[in-house]
Structures are given as C-alpha cells and as structure tokens.
Amino acid sequence: MDIEEDILIQKYETLLYNKESIYFDAEEFGIIITYYMMEERYADALEALIHAELCHPENIELSLHKIRIMMNLDNFDRAFELLLMLEKKVDDILEIHVYKGHIYTLNDEIENAVKEFELAFEKNPGLDEEELQYIPDILIEQKYFNAALMFLHKFIDSDKADAETFFKAGQCYEQISNIQEAEKYYEKSLDEDPFNEKTWIILGAMHLNSNNFAKALEAFEFALSINNNAFIASFCKIVTLMQSNEYDKAIDCIMEALSKLPGDAQVMYTLGECYEKKQDLPEAEDCYTKAISQEIDFDLPYWGLSKILYAQGDIESAIQVIDKAIELEPDNENYLYFRGQCFISLCNNKNMLDTILQNLSSIKNSNAEKSDDSEFINKHKKAVFFYNIRSMEECCKYLLESILIDNKGLEMFFNLFPEAKDDAYIINYFGKHLK
C-alpha cells in the first residue's frame, strides 16, 4: 500500500471511529474496499460498501465490488442474483461474463461457463483486459484443462503470451497426459523466462518420468545453477543419477546435500539406497539405522534395514523391523510380500520358496498371451504369500480374485499347497462365495 492509500484508509477509519459523516468519491471507496478484500476483512469491506452505495447508488464499479465480496464469502447464489440484476441495468460488460462463468464452473456447468468466457473474449478482442487473464486460472483450478487450453491458445495464437501463459499451457497438457506438448510449452516458458527455477524442475521431472536421464539431469543442473540451495532440484538430480546407475556420482551429491541438511532422514535413507545398490551392505545398514534415529516414524528406512538383515541371514530381526514398517504403512504390498518371504525362509523351507517361484514363472508362461496376465499373477502371488503368513482372510480374498480372472488359479494353488484342500477356513470361504 502506497502513502496516499495509507492516508486514505486512516482517514476513513478515523471518520468511522468518530461516527462522523463519511464521503469519498467512488474511486476512493473502491480503493478502501479493495484494501479490505486483500486483507480478507470482508465484514469491513461490506461496511465500506454500504457507505459507498449511500453516496453513489448507481455506480457500476461498486456493484461489481459487491459481487466480488459475495464470491469471496462463497455466497455464490447471492453473487449470481446480483449479476443478473446488473446485467439488466447496463450494457454487456466484461466482468459480468467472467464472474458468471466462474460461478458456472463451481457448479460444474462447464458448457455455460465456456459460453460466458467466450462472450468475455468477444467483448475484448484486443486481449488487453486483466480480467481475461483470470479465465484460464479459473478453469485450471476446477480441473477443466482442455477448456483452459482453448482460452490460453487465444493468447498464444495472438502473440500475446508471456512466460506464465506458456507455463500454464504446459501444466494443462501435462494434466491431460500430452507429454510432448507439455514439454514444448514448458520450454517456451523458459525461452521467455530462463531463470525460473520451478519450471526447470518440472521439465526435469517430466524428462525423468520419460527415462530421458540426460535431459532430466541437464534441467536439474540448470535449476541448481539458478539456486544452488534448491533442495528439490538437488534431490531430483540424485534420483536421476540413481536411475542411471551412477551411484558414485549420486553419493557425491548426497554428501553435499547432507552438509546442508545433516539431520534429514530422507536424504540419509537415499544414501543407504545407493550403498545397497552398490552391494556395500554395512554402509547401507549404517545409513538406514541413522535415518531411523533421525525420524522414527519414517517407514522406508525400516524397509531398507529389514532387507539388509535378511541378506545377512538374520531373518527374525528382519521380521521385527519389517513389522515396524507395516505398522507405519499397513497397505504397502512390498512390505507384506517381504514379510511372507521372511516367514518362508525362517522355516528353512527352501524347496517351498523355489516351488513358489517356479509356480509363478509357469503361471506367467501359460498366460503369456493374456491381456490380464500381470493382474492374475499379482493376485495369485498375494494369495500365496498371505497363505504362508496364515493371514487366511486376505489369502482367500486374493485367491478368489485370481480365480475370477482365470479358473485355473485354484488348481494351481492346490498343486502348490495340497493341504489347503482340507483347510476349514478355505472350504467355508469358498462355500459361501461360490454358491
């Protein structure tokens, strides 16, 4: 707020406090109302509006301020009533269409919203009104990405686009999974604003998801050249190096990150991952243990440590540690499978484990041409592991789901576990569900 606005607000509040007569011109009232709205003091904004309407009862801009206040108070029905009343009193104005369109999007009436927004653009073919810039934002906020793109391209196709416009187009294309166009418009945004750290990180993440590690690394390094302390860019660079199997380089980056964030459990866990991939299990174990001490309710270090303990042959300790991970993330399938494998190994039943692996392999081969092959294997595998840890309800649930995909699933299961044919729980479960 500049000095003149500050003086105006102080004058208004002094008159209000002393209960004196209040008069300002309409523009000054607009400044006062806008100030209170920016401060989210909507009751004060409404009070100022009442005084303003007494002084200027037919002023259109004050009517628009009232509509804005109602919308900020989420009183959209009242705002729409006021819009319709204003529409009857004045010729078409841009704001009426923008605000009506906004309310339509909130009510999921996207066709009506687009019609109103189209009218707003027709009223201003030069695209120089600030209100038009809000239209794509409104649509993006409500996840109407295709509609937002339609209006963003009005700016792009008229050479009125800036870095932010291209960035929003990239966002929309990314949300509708048009990755090629998303990358194109993020790059256009960077052509306009090459020092935007956030855009470099997003572009890098897209390259990383596409397994284009060289471009991803380049993007994250650009972000770091802009802001050497950008933790997200630094971490993404580490992930990129790991996925490229460049573990030594990743470790160097992690050490640099740890010098800035020495107590960060996520960074320490990631260091453990690198050492585990390098088969340096003692270093990995040390990192996972440190990560647990830094953040006791972080599940991933328990998962990492349990794998190390398993590899070292300490199965009972591995089970205790993976149980902690499951306590923190009870629906994590990797943890549940691993726990089942631990129990199998604890029984020293290597033949059973080999049979399970062979069985899964044979399932994969016999169903190689099926489109639902992976889903069947996944369900069957869950049934096998839950049976081994005697979680019968979960076992039967997944066994039933596998049978619904391929009726050979039950036969395969009984070939693996002949004793299961006489299991009372399984008999009762399938008696109830397969009547």
Image (cartoon, rainbow, N blue to C red):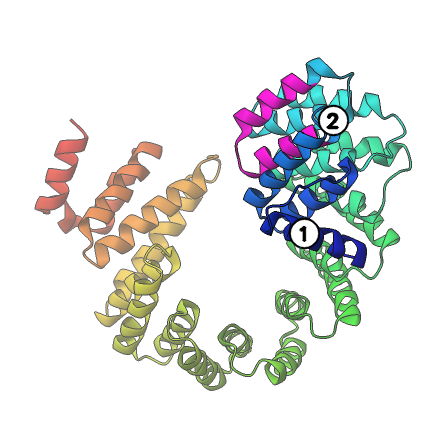
Disc 1 packing (10 Å; few <14; some 14–19; many ≥20)? few
Res. 306 visible in picture: yes
Looking at the rendering, which quadrant does residue 308 occupy? bottom left
Image-based side of 359 in relation to 430, left or right: right
Where residue 433 appears, x then y in whole percent? Answer: 18, 32
- Residue at figure coordinates x 63%, y 32% from the top left: 66
Image-based side of 398 in relation to 76, left or right: left
* Circle count: 2
Where residue 406 appears, x then y in whole percent? Answer: 34, 34
Looking at the rendering, which quadrant does residue 243 occupy? bottom right
Magenta-tinted stretch:
62-86
Where residue 309 appears, x then y in whole percent? Answer: 36, 78
Where residue 186 appears, x then y in whole percent? Answer: 78, 49
Q: Which residue is mark 1?
A: 210
Q: Nearer the viewer, residue 73 or 109?
A: 73
Res. 139 visible in picture: no
- Alpha-carbon distance for marks 2 and 1? 52 Å
Image-based side of 347 in relation to 129, left or right: left
Quarter of the image that includes the N terminus: bottom right
Q: Is residue 96 above or below residue 337?
A: above
Considering the whole magenta stretch, tell me its main secondary structure.
Answer: helix
